[in-house]
Amino acid sequence: MQAGKLLPFIVALATTGAAFSACSNSAQSAGDPTPSPRNVCSVVNFQQVKTALGEPTTGGIGCKIAPGSQSSALYIVQIPGEQSGPTTVETHLYWGYRATHTFTVIHSGHAKWTTSQGAPIPPPKYDAVTVAGVPAYWNLNEAAVSESPSLQSIEAMKNGFLVTVSSNALSGPPTLSRKQLEKVLAVALTSL
């Protein structure tokens, strides 16, 4: 199973030919009902993102449900006086077995990461935190960070929905703090 085809925050692993297999009791099984599709902007809207970040923000671009049991929105943040230019913030909402099962297996510690030839590779690294009473994970994947040093991504799952919040400074180091992005994630988790 190609990790890069399952969730965007694992895309960097797919470019190295990484795959994983697992035996785990998932929070959702293939027979469980799938939550009804939701637009991510109904879970965390533009004004809530702007308030959580505390910075001048424009966007809500692409607030719609897309194929593949997902919805996403893009925001542009321009911090006054910041020389590195604008920062993008993306919110994604996933539902359905594939996304929730993959999330559960990855964070259960039961995934076995291998190359396409079966050779073992180190698993991605995460920093576990709690946001709005829900376990959440900062992606510390070195491959993604080396591609884009300013990329930050946090994910959490609640009520059958997987939420990811990521930011990327278009040039230079990260301009938004983890706390700011955790506030955006908290709004989304509270709405689920």
Image (spheres, rainbow, N blue to C red):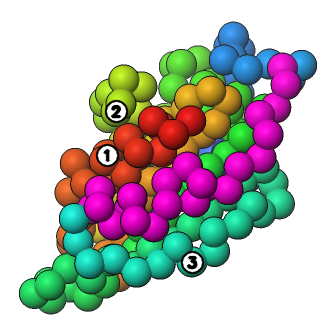
Q: Quadrant of residue 147?
A: bottom left
Kind of residue at badge 2:
Val
Q: Quadrant of residue 163?
A: top right
Q: Which residue is pictured at 66% across the width and 17% down the height?
A: 27
Where residue 188 sits: x, y (%)? 48, 45
Task: For marks 1 and 2, give the CA distance.
Answer: 7 Å
Looking at the image, residue 16 lies above or below residue 140 = below
Where residue 119 sits: x, y (%)? 63, 35
Report the disc number at residue 131. 2
Task: Identify the mark nearer the N-term, 3 or 2.
Answer: 3
Q: Residue furthest left?
A: 81
The reply to whether the C-beta atoms of the residues labelled 3 and 2 are less than 8 Å apart is: no
Q: Which residue matches tag 3?
A: 61
Kind of residue at badge 1:
Glu
Quarter the C terminus occupies: top right
Q: Residue furthest right?
A: 31
